[in-house]
Each structure stands twice: as structure tokens, then as C-alpha cells.
Image (spheres, grey):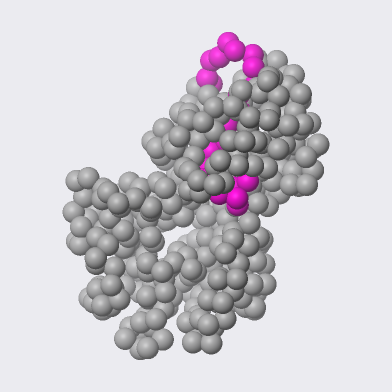
């Protein structure tokens, strides 16, 4: 059996790292019986100082279909990682960030100075080169790219993109030939089950925003779009306040909304509550500047909640399948029109679409091509 040694800055039970951890855990759920997954991660969530409770650190423990080693911050030295890699039997190393200083840069530094000689390294940037992400701290990132290229950090690396769009971003930013990039769509959660349609009496449109509060996720853009909406609605916001100044900007925009749009912030949402909360809403509204996959989109659809998103995600042709709408970000009137139309649609009709959305989503999730592409990603990685 092929053994994959995965390095990811945060993993479950943490949830503040967003979709990256979800992508890794979903991969282990789908392919954990075909490959052996060894995951190295931090013993606490990103941005927090408290370690997970009741988790043993520094040793391999069984988590789902993988074995995970949780490391304390003082174990994140290049010497410790060197000894960990040298003492672990594996066939390939999988890195889940280009700019990650916790693991990726240390692993690649050990490689270029010859202290470790992995046969294969797979690197998944996880959307870091999309326009919305890459423009943040652009100069610092560009300097690092040029220096790391001169040092040969990324020589003989196999690249993974989650979509054609991400492959184009990687190729453009890093000047990598397209044939060096393997495309495999991130896998959805394979453990969800179709639930009964939620019963509601309140006719008012219920819309949810669920994402990290960063400019890339575009909460400010969502609030600006709502200024052009004429239908009453509840707009509930769930997420983590990563940038205090940005959050204050969003609060100011929320105060400018028409009186008939009720905005409420509910804080971060624990993973085990995501499906049940999403099922209470008519629509997930996420006009982000880009999504590598967009796990919250898949989670919304899995419980029958349609989505209104930008065109900068892998979720295309939603209108054709009845799963929602993808609109160009500069088309504010287009977003507003969808929201107004939904607001004037009778509640019974809105609820009636949910079983169909669930069935159509399940059919899309079980696309055998996506699973096969991920399988080949780990079993056939060509040295460049």
C-alpha cells in the first residue's frame, strides 16, 4: 500500500483553518482504504494558544481513516521535522500550502540542502494563487517566490490544482508549464445523509453568509450588494473575525442597509453544526473573490440550500442543474435580481425545491471522475 506523508498546519478537531483541513480529511474518507495516510499537524487550531483537549502529542494516533501526529509549537523546529521525516516510512510527501512557514518551507529547505531525499513531493497550493488571495501581501509574496525559485525550492515538485482555473493561476504566477500541474477536484464529504425538508412558517427570506472574514471572502461586497436589494430578509453572518479592521468596515456597511434587511452576527460555527444550521436557510450567499473548492458550498447543497456565488469558483453551471446561481462580481444588479426574485417567491415553493437540490447535489458529488483523478494524483506522480 502506498503511504502518503501529509503536512498541514491545522487539522481536525480544529476548524479555523477553513477548507484546507476539510479537503484533507475528505480525501482520507474516500481513499483511506486504498492508501495509508500519515498526517502531521499542529496540536492547536490556527491562531489560538490553547491545545486540543484529550489529544496525545508527538505520537501517531488513529483519527478516522488516517494516523495523525499532533505537534506542540516547540516541536516545530527544522531538526525535529528532519528526524520525523527520516524516521517515517512513506512513498511521497504531500504539502498543503505554498507559503506555509510551519511545514512547507522547512521541508523544502531540508530537501535542497540534501538532508532529506523524498522520491516524490506533491504540493497543493489550495487557492493561494487566486486573485483574491494572492493580492494580499503581494509584494512580500512575490519576493519570496523569486528567492525560492533562485534557491531551487520547487525543482522536481509535482503540482496539484483543484480546478482548471487554479491550474491557470499557478502556471501564470509561478511560470510553470501546464503539463507539470495535475488537476483533481477536491472531494466532498462522503458522510452526509439526505435529511427531511425543514418546516418553517416565517415567509421572510432567510440568507446565510458562512466564511472567514477576509477580503478574499468578500463579506463587504455582499453587504454592498444588499444595498441594492428591495426585498425583506434576514441576513445571518457566521464566521471568524481574522482581521479586526476589516470586520469594523463590514459592521459600518451593515448599518447602512435598508431597515427591512435584518443583519445579525452569530460568531464562528463548529463543524458538527454546519449542516443543521445551513438547512434552516433559503440561500447561502457567498460572492467571494475566489474559492479553491468551496466546501461550504457543497455543504449547503447537501442539505438542499441553494447557493448564490461568484463565477470565481469551480462550481459552474449551477443554473442549469437548479442548484443556484453564479454571477460575475461586477454584476451587482444580477445578484440583487436573484435575491429580489427569491424574496417574492412563496415559502412553500422555496421549501419545495430542497429535495430536488439534495438529489442533484448528491449526483454531482458522486462524480466518479473526481475520485479517479484524486486516486491518480497519489498513485501516479511523475518526476519532472
For image coordinates 66% across by 39% down, the residue present is 222
Q: Where is residue 40, by image quadrant? A: bottom left
Tell whether position 14 is magenta: no
State which region is magenta: 197-219
User: Which of these two is toward me, 84 or 26?
Assistant: 84
- Prevailing SS of the magenta stretch: loop
Residue 366: x %, y % from top left:
54, 46
User: Which of these two is toward me, 375 or 5?
Assistant: 5
Residue 135: x %, y % from top left:
63, 62
Most extreme residue toward the top is: 201
* Quarter the N terminus occupies: bottom left
Q: Is residue 157 left or right of residue 350?
A: left
User: Which of these two is toward me, 153 or 32?
Assistant: 153
For image coordinates 58% across by 10% down, the residue present is 201
Q: Is residue 208 visible?
A: yes
Residue 21: x %, y % from top left:
42, 53
Residue 67 lies, with reference to residue 331, above or below; the image says below
Amino acid at each position: 500500500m502506498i503511504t502518503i506523508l501529509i503536512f498541514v498546519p491545522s487539522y481536525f478537531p480544529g476548524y479555523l483553518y477553513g477548507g484546507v483541513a476539510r479537503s484533507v480529511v475528505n480525501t482520507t474518507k474516500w481513499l483511506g482504504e486504498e492508501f495509508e495516510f500519515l498526517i502531521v499537524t499542529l496540536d492547536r487550531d490556527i491562531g489560538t494558544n490553547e491545545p486540543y483537549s484529550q489529544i496525545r502529542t508527538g505520537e501517531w494516533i488513529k483519527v478516522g481513516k488516517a494516523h495523525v501526529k499532533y505537534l506542540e509549537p516547540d516541536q516545530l523546529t527544522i531538526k525535529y521535522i528532519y528526524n520525523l521525516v527520516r524516521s517515517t516510512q512513506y512513498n511521497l510527501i504531500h504539502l498543503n500550502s505554498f507559503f506555509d512557514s510551519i511545514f512547507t518551507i522547512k521541508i523544502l529547505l531540508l530537501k535542497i540542502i540534501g538532508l532529506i531525499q523524498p522520491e516524490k513531493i506533491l504540493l497543493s497550493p489550495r487557492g493561494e494563487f487566486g486573485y483574491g488571495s494572492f493580492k494580499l501581501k503581494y509584494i512580500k509574496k512575490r519576493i519570496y517566490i523569486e528567492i525560492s525559485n533562485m534557491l531551487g525550492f520547487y525543482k522536481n515538485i509535482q503540482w496539484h490544482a483543484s480546478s482548471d482555473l487554479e491550474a491557470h493561476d499557478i502556471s501564470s504566477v509561478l511560470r510553470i508549464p501546464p503539463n507539470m500541474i495535475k488537476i483533481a477536484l477536491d472531494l466532498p464529504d462522503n458522510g452526509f445523509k439526505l435529511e427531511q425538508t425543514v418546516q418553517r412558517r416565517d415567509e421572510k427570506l432567510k440568507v446565510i453568509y458562512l466564511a472567514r472574514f477576509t477580503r478574499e471572502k468578500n463579506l463587504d461586497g455582499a453587504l454592498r450588494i444588499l444595498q441594492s436589494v428591495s426585498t425583506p430578509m434576514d441576513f445571518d453572518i457566521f464566521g471568524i473575525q481574522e482581521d479586526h479592521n476589516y470586520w469594523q468596515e463590514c459592521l459600518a456597511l451593515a448599518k447602512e442597509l435598508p431597515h427591512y434587511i435584518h443583519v445579525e452576527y452569530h460568531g464562528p460555527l463548529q463543524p458538527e453544526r454546519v449542516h443543521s444550521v445551513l438547512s434552516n436557510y433559503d440561500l447561502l450567499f457567498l460572492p467571494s473573490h475566489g474559492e479553491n473548492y468551496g466546501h461550504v458550498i457543497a455543504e449547503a447543497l447537501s442539505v438542499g440550500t441553494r447557493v448564490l456565488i461568484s463565477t470565481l469558483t469551480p462550481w459552474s453551471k449551477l443554473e442549469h442543474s437548479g442548484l443556484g446561481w453564479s454571477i460575475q462580481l461586477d454584476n451587482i444588479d444580477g445578484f440583487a435580481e436573484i435575491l429580489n426574485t427569491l424574496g417574492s417567491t412563496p415559502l412553500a415553493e422555496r421549501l419545495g425545491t430542497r429535495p430536488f437540490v439534495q438529489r442533484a447535489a448528491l449526483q454531482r458529488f458522486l462524480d466518479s471522475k473526481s475520485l479517479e483523478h484524486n486516486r491518480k494524483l497519489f498513485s501516479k506522480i511523475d518526476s519532472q
